[in-house]
Amino acid sequence: MNKKLTTVFSVLIVIAFIAYIIYDSSHSSGIEKIQAKTESSDTLQDRWSLTDIIPVTEGSLRAISVAQDGNVIAGGVSFISIYGKDHRLIRSIRTDSAVISLCTFGDTIFASTHDQILVYTMNGRLAEEWGPFESKSYITSVSANSSYIAYADAGNRMIVILDRKGRVERIIGQNDGQFIVPSPYFDIAISKDGNLIVANTGQRRIETRSASGELLSMFGEPGTAPEAFCGCCNPAHFAIMPEGFVTAEKGINRIKILDRNGRFVEFVSSKNKFLSSEPLDVAVFSEKVIYAANPADSRIYKFIRGN
């Protein structure tokens, strides 16, 4: 009987040892794959050139947008400034509160404070003032088209759709678990076909939703690989490009381009000295020109593709 027990015990040890070897082998293989992806990311070269730096002296820079005519709109504490294509200041507008995000549509500027949307004409006139909206609001992003305006509220973890008069049409989310927002980075944009593009930052992914909020598609994964999003809350900022998206991350402060399916295209800026904790807001003028607003030094960086 003792002999039988000893034999069984020996067999169990062998099985356990084999299982450990299999596990260790597969686990090590997984680590090698992750390291390989990271190393390939390190060896990739930036495909864009930094051609211009615009110092912003009107206040602490937070946000950026580009108008159809190529004028650059900057916002922050507590101002909105318009720069011409030659990067010279055209006009600066004082605001009562800090401007957190910006967008332009036609000849209109939409600017968000933490609880309001301010609507300006390009000549600097305040045309509309919408809000304050929900309590505990912290509006981090605004976007507009000919039909509606959308803003992202990181405080209440929701997206609000307004009509062209600033009246609330619908709310998507509102702390129901659809959006995981660990920090005040929660970007949105309206695509050409009227869908919402949303950075669900706690999930490290970009989602496409209908204007009614239905989830249509998504992509993204955590990690340091070129196509992945690192840290707890990325992409911190993004903008729509003709071939997909330009994204900016915190943690590893890099700017990159992904196609519409989330596949990596190229780095705009990965080998830089930007502060890892201060991601740059980004705006696209064309497939060859990207602007980035750096809150750490209050400068606008202009990147040109292929130079």
Image (cartoon, rainbow, N blue to C red):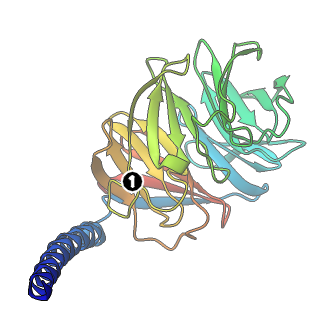
Residue sitting at x 38%, y 46%: 220
Residue sitting at x 57%, y 19%: 145
The quarter of the rendered structure image containing the N terminus is bottom left
Q: Amino acid at mark 1?
A: Lys
User: Given the current orientation, which residue lies at the most extreme right position?
Assistant: 96
The quadrant in which residue 171 appears is: top right
Give x and y (percent) for residue 283: 52, 43
Residue sitting at x 77%, y 30%: 117
Say which residue label 1 marks.
256
Q: Nearer the viewer, residue 18 or 101?
A: 18
User: Given the current orientation, which residue lies at the most extreme front position?
Assistant: 1
Looking at the image, residue 3 sits to the left or right of residue 207; the answer is left
**Residue 78 seen in this snapshot:** yes
Residue sitting at x 38%, y 61%: 223
Whether residue 207 is situated above or below residue 238 in the rendered picture:
above
**Residue 282 seen in this snapshot:** no
Q: Nearer the viewer, residue 105 or 194?
A: 194
The quadrant in which residue 244 appears is: top left
Count the marks. Answer: 1
Looking at the image, residue 261 sits to the left or right of residue 58; the answer is left
The quarter of the rendered structure image containing the C terminus is bottom left
Give x and y (percent) for residue 167: 77, 14
* Label 1 CA crowd tier, 10 Å (few <14, some 14–19, many 20+): many
Secondary structure under badge 1? strand
Q: Nearer the viewer, residue 51 or 79?
A: 79
Give x and y (percent) for residue 97: 86, 44
Looking at the image, residue 94 sits to the left or right of residue 16; the answer is right
